[in-house]
């Protein structure tokens, strides 16, 4: 009998001592902090200029192709430059074809985000390729006469769209800024 009272007393004490009802834990959310965007203008001998994120590294090649690297995000924007010699439609189809080659793995390719600046003669499209693809952001810009600039964002990791969406959105605003600040140089 004494054992039963002792066990019952311990159980009662544990129940009363806890005092609060158990509550489910709140769902945790990943908090990523990215630096605020500050931009600097490119300095090259190429026939174009634009502004890029100051904490990124930019490297130009002899053919005016460029790489904008985001070391902390393990990402690179690969930029290609093509001069137009009565082949604008051919170049634009080639750039668009590269984007739509991702349809095999893509969940969706929403319509391209257009950009037009008649004063600066910059006409561009930004493609957001959703899903586990090699390149989630691609763009092309042209003056419709002499120049075509195309770019693709790549991460140095296995594509896992759900995990990299915050980084994609962060770099997307930098690409939009890049497009909005393109200036074509006079190549006479």
Image: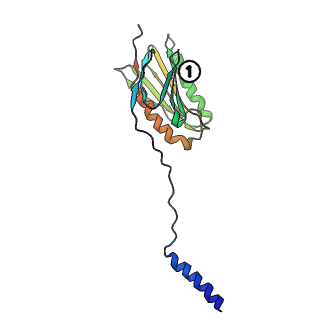
Query: For the point 53% across and 30% down, which residue is it?
Result: 76
Residue 11, quarter of the rendered image: bottom right
Q: Quadrant for the N terminus, please.
A: bottom right
**Pointer 1: residues within 10 angstroms few (<14), some, or many (20+)?**
few
Q: Does residue 108 appear in the picture of this structure?
A: no
| Image quadrant occupied by the C terminus | top left
Q: Is residue 98 visible?
A: yes
> What residue lies at 50% left-to-right and 31% top-to-bottom?
127
Q: Secondary structure at mark 1?
A: helix
Q: Where does the image place residue 155, in percent across and percent down from the top left? A: 56, 34
Q: Is residue 51 above or below residue 18?
A: above
Left or right of 26 on screen, residue 160: right
Q: Nearer the viewer, residue 52 or 165?
A: 52
Q: How many marks?
A: 1
In the image: residue 156, left or right of residue 187: right
Residue where numbered disc 1 is placed: 94
* Residue 89 to residue 112: above or below: above
Residue 114 in which image quadrant: top left
Q: Position of residue 72 (x, y in %)?
A: 51, 36
Where 156 falls versus 65 (above or below)? Answer: below
| Spot occupied by residue 170 in the image (x, y as percentages of width and height) | 46, 38
Q: How is the image coloured?
A: rainbow
Rendering coords of residue 150 (x, y %):
50, 23
Q: Quadrant of residue 144?
A: top left
Of all residues, the one furthest to the bottom in this rendering is 1
Q: Write the residue at 62% across / 34% down.
A: 104
């Amino acid at each position: 009998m004494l054992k039963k009272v002792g066990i019952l007393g311990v159980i009662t004490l544990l129940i009363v001592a806890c005092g609060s009802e158990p509550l489910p834990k709140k769902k945790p959310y990943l908090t990523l902090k990215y630096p605020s965007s500050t931009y600097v203008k490119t300095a090259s001998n190429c026939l174009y200029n634009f502004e890029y994120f100051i904490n990124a590294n930019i490297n130009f090649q002899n053919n005016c192709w460029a790489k904008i690297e985001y070391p902390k995000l393990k990402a690179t924007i690969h930029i290609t430059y093509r001069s137009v010699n009565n082949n604008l439609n051919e170049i634009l189809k080639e750039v668009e074809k590269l984007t739509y080659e991702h349809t095999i793995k893509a969940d969706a390719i929403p319509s391209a985000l257009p950009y037009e600046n008649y004063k600066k003669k910059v006409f561009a499209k930004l493609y957001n390729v959703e899903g586990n693809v090699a390149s989630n952001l691609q763009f092309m810009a042209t003056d419709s006469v002499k120049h075509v600039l195309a770019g693709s964002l790549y991460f140095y990791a296995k594509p896992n769209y759900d995990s990299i969406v915050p980084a994609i959105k962060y770099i997307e605003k930098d690409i939009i800024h890049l497009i909005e600040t393109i200036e074509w140089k006079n190549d006479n």
